[in-house]
Each structure stands twice: as structure tokens, then as C-alpha cells.
Image: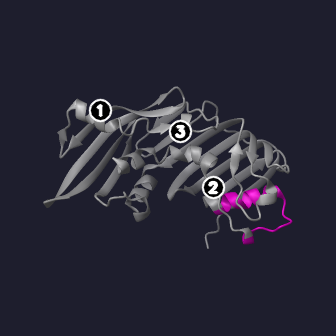
């Protein structure tokens, strides 16, 4: 079930990735006398590899790494080897590591008071990740993994190669939909599992799915992110907090990747 869990939770982790993601930027790429906001901007570009990006800060980070208000809008960024079509984040009272350390260590988020987020991932981008070796399963038995977003639900399919006495490919399919519980947990609901086109008994299915429930548990994180909305169409899924992130007037940086 490990690869199936990867398939159905990869697009959810992008929202919390801003909080837990260690932004990696080589120290040699930074100018020692550059403003802290510029170093933060360069770190986001290097770490998230966006196609386009807008960063707004209400102030320069202070000596402790504190920023009162931050807005980040990314198109086509990369998190964990998966292309994210759109990711927008607005956060209040963000505590980064001290800027004095950014010449040798990448900026990292320590805490924040409040966060609004909205993320969209495309079906085609998830499937590209599933087909890559980097995103493969640990035991090498899974192959031909496919995730299909549908209106109000999803379908996941994969073949599992058994090697006991003789080789046998088993087709495993999973259908269901997502439910948000208490704003902190994302569960798979109304699910059905099939093995070689035959529905599994409910007791076996529930036992298998219980190993991955909840798909995402935000209670494990100290950051104040609460999910409120999930929209699924035939080609994409969008997750969002109750209020959408909004830009504001402040120190602004924009970036667009060169086509060269």
C-alpha cells in the first residue's frame, strides 16, 4: 500500500511542504551584503524551481528572522519531484532562522501565527511522478501505477508483481473520494478495492485502507494550517483553507524562468 499512499497524498503534502521544506540554496550563490529579503527570494527560487513566482514581504526580516506578513505565489514549482501547477500562501508572523546564518545554512521556517493556502495539482503531473524512478516504491514490486482524478472522486490503479514460486502480476484498483475531518485530517471515504477486477470483501478492504487513514494528519504539525475546501475535477485537484491567500503592498520580488 506504500505506493498507493504516495499516489493519493502527494498533492496534499504540497500545502504543508512550505512549512517543513528545507529550502536549499548554495552559500556561493548569495551575496554577503544582499538584503535578507533578496536572500529569501533567491532561496525560494533555488529550492522550489518555479516557472513563475511572486514574493511579497511587509518588511525586511529582522535579526531574528521574523517577518510580520508574507505572500508567496508560485506557478509550476517543484516539490518532492512533483510539479505543482499553482501554490499560493499568505502567512502572518513568520519566524525564519536568523538571517545571519543564511550565508552558510538555507533559510528555514520555525513557526508562524496564521496561514492561508491554496494549491492545485494536475493529474498529468502526478502520473509523471509516479512513473519516475525517483517516486517508485521501495520493494520494486509495483509498476504501471496510474491515478485518475474524477468529479468528486479518484481512481488509483497499479500492478503488483509477486515472486513466490512463480511470477504473477496482480491488478489492484482503488476508487473513493476525499473527506476533510475537523479541518486537520483528510480521509478516504466511500472506497472500493478490487483485485483482478473482483471486489474485495468489506472487512478486507477496511483493514487495508485503515493502514493509510488518515491520508494526511495536520495534527502532527505545529503550524496553524486548517483545510476547508477540496475541489476535484477530471484533471486536477485543488485544496484550500477557508480564506484564500491575497497579495498586499510591500517589498515585492517577481521571477520568471528563462526559456533558454
| Badge 1 element | helix
Give the alpha-carbon distance from disc 2 to disc 1, as whole Å.
35 Å
Q: Which residues are magenta?
A: 28-46
Q: Is residue 178 above or below residue 48?
A: above
Q: Earlier in the sequence, mark 1 or mark 3?
A: 1
Q: Which residue is mark 1?
A: 206
Q: Earlier in the sequence, mark 2 or mark 3?
A: 2
**Where is residue 193 shown, x and y percent of the image?**
26, 39
How would you rate the neighbour count of disc 3 (Cα within 10 Å): few for under 14, some for 14-19, many for 20 or more?
many
User: Local crowd at mark 2 within 10 Å, few (<14), some, or many (≥20)?
Assistant: some
34 within the magenta span: yes
The nearer-to-camera label among 1 and 3 is: 1
Under tag 3, what secondary structure? strand
Rendered image: mark on residue 22: 2
Judging depth in this view, the residue of 159 and 203 nearest the camera is 203
Q: Which mark is residue 73?
A: none
Report the residue at 29% width, 35% height from top. Answer: 207
Measure how far apart labels 2 and 3 are at the Cα level.
22 Å
Q: Determine if residue 37 is in view.
A: yes
Residue 89 inside the magenta-drawn segment: no
> Residue 209: image x %, image y %?
33, 37
Q: Residue at x 29, y 32 (%)?
A: 206
Q: Which residue is mark 3?
A: 239
Image position of 6 (left or right of 28) = left
Amino acid at each position: 500500500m506504500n505506493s498507493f499512499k504516495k499516489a493519493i497524498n502527494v498533492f496534499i503534502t504540497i500545502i504543508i511542504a512550505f512549512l517543513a521544506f528545507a529550502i536549499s540554496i548554495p552559500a556561493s550563490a548569495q551575496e554577503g551584503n544582499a538584503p535578507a529579503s533578496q536572500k529569501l527570494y533567491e532561496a525560494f527560487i533555488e529550492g522550489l524551481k518555479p516557472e513563475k513566482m511572486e514574493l511579497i514581504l511587509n518588511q525586511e526580516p529582522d535579526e531574528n528572522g521574523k517577518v510580520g506578513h508574507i505572500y508567496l505565489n508560485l506557478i509550476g514549482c517543484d516539490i518532492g519531484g512533483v510539479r505543482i501547477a499553482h501554490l499560493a500562501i499568505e502567512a502572518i508572523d513568520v519566524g525564519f532562522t536568523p538571517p545571519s546564518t543564511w550565508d552558510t545554512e538555507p533559510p528555514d521556517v520555525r513557526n508562524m501565527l496564521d496561514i492561508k493556502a491554496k494549491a492545485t495539482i494536475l493529474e498529468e503531473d502526478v502520473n509523471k511522478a509516479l512513473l519516475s524512478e525517483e517516486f517508485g516504491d521501495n520493494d520494486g514490486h509495483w509498476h504501471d501505477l496510474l491515478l485518475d482524478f474524477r468529479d468528486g472522486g479518484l481512481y488509483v490503479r497499479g500492478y503488483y508483481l509477486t515472486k513466490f514460486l512463480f511470477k504473477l502480476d496482480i491488478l489492484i484498483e482503488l476508487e473513493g473520494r476525499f473527506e476533510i475531518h475537523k479541518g486537520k485530517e483528510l480521509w478516504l471515504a466511500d472506497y472500493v478495492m478490487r483485485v483482478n477486477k473482483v471486489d474485495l470483501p468489506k472487512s478486507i478492504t477496511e483493514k487495508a485502507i485503515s493502514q493509510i487513514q488518515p491520508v494526511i494528519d495536520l495534527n502532527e504539525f505545529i503550524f496553524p494550517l486548517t483545510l476547508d475546501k477540496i475541489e476535484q475535477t477530471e484533471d486536477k485537484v485543488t485544496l484550500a483553507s477557508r480564506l484564500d491567500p491575497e497579495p498586499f503592498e510591500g517589498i515585492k520580488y517577481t521571477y520568471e524562468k528563462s526559456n533558454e
